[in-house]
Amino acid sequence: MDCAFAMNTDMIYRGIRYLGIGLIFVSLAWALYKGAGPETHPGGPAFSRAVGLYTDEKYEEALRDYETSIREHPDFIHAQRGRARTLMQLGRDREALEAFNEVLKRDPGSAVSFANRGILQDRMGHFPQAIADYDRAIKTDPRLGEGLDWFTRLLQNRKEKPQTLADRLQTLRQGDAGPN
């Protein structure tokens, strides 16, 4: 009986090992298959590059790729949003404001775009417009008023908890613009 149990256990372990090795090969084959295919992102390869460059804070290069994506896919709103954010990061405030206005004309329900335009207008000293944009963003998506959660801050290596949109909105409404 002990010999039969040992053989049975040995066969089970062998089966588990082959299954594990098989799963490794299947996942490698899937990764190769997905990585070798053509770009299927609706914004094209330029958009994918732009997102990576923006994340790496290479804003000039990101802007070029966002603009390429917009030329190739003029209806892809995410590339236009990325372009507006990138212009803001580059300090090209007037161009960024025009870009956010265009995005919001095309997508008037975009809470994130209202929040970003509010941040831009706040930086530009256009406090009444910033208040209106912050308010609209938070009413459209209340989570935007809460700020970044601890996990996102950890991933972005932010040690300090930044001021939330709701906090900034309250500060502006009290008439004490101060630094944001």
Image (tube, rainbow, N blue to C red):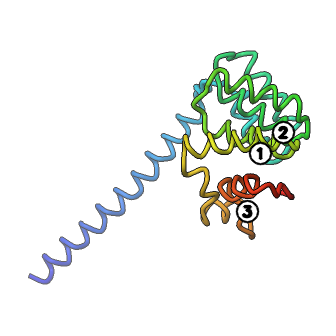
Q: Is residue 106 above or below residue 12?
A: above
Quadrant of residue 54 within the rendered picture: top right
Tell me if 20 is positioned left or right of 100 in this view: left
Front position among marks 2 and 1: 1
In the rendered structure, are the residues bearing label 2 and label 1 in contact, judged by CB atoms less than 8 Å apart? Answer: yes
Question: The disc labelled 1 sits on which kind of residue?
Answer: Ile
Which of marks 2 and 3 precedes in the sequence?
2
Residue drawn 91% across the image and 35% down it: 92
Q: Secondary structure at mark 2?
A: helix
Q: Which mark is residue 88?
A: 2
**Could you say where residue 57 lies in the image, as x and y percent from the top left?**
83, 47
Alpha carbons under labels 3 and 2: distance apart: 18 Å
> Which one is nearer the viewer's eye here, 170 or 13?
170
Q: Is residue 130 above or below residue 161?
A: above
Q: Quadrant of the C terminus?
A: bottom right
Quadrant of residue 131 within the rendered picture: top right
Neighbour class for label 1 at 10 Å: few (<14), some, many (≥20)?
many
**Could you say where residue 120 lies in the image, as x and y percent from the top left?**
81, 41
Residue drawn 85% across the image and 46% down it: 123
**Could you say where residue 10 lies in the image, as x and y percent from the top left?**
26, 71
> Which one is nearer the viewer's eye here, 98 or 156?
98
Question: The disc labelled 3 sits on which kind of residue?
Answer: Pro
Q: Is residue 179 above or below residue 5?
A: above
- Return the residue at label 1: 119
Q: Is residue 63 above or below residue 145?
A: above
Which of marks 3 and 1 precedes in the sequence?
1
- In the image as oriented, which residue stretches furthest toward the left? 1
Total count of labels: 3
Residue drawn 59% across the image and 36% down it: 35
- Return the residue at label 3: 162
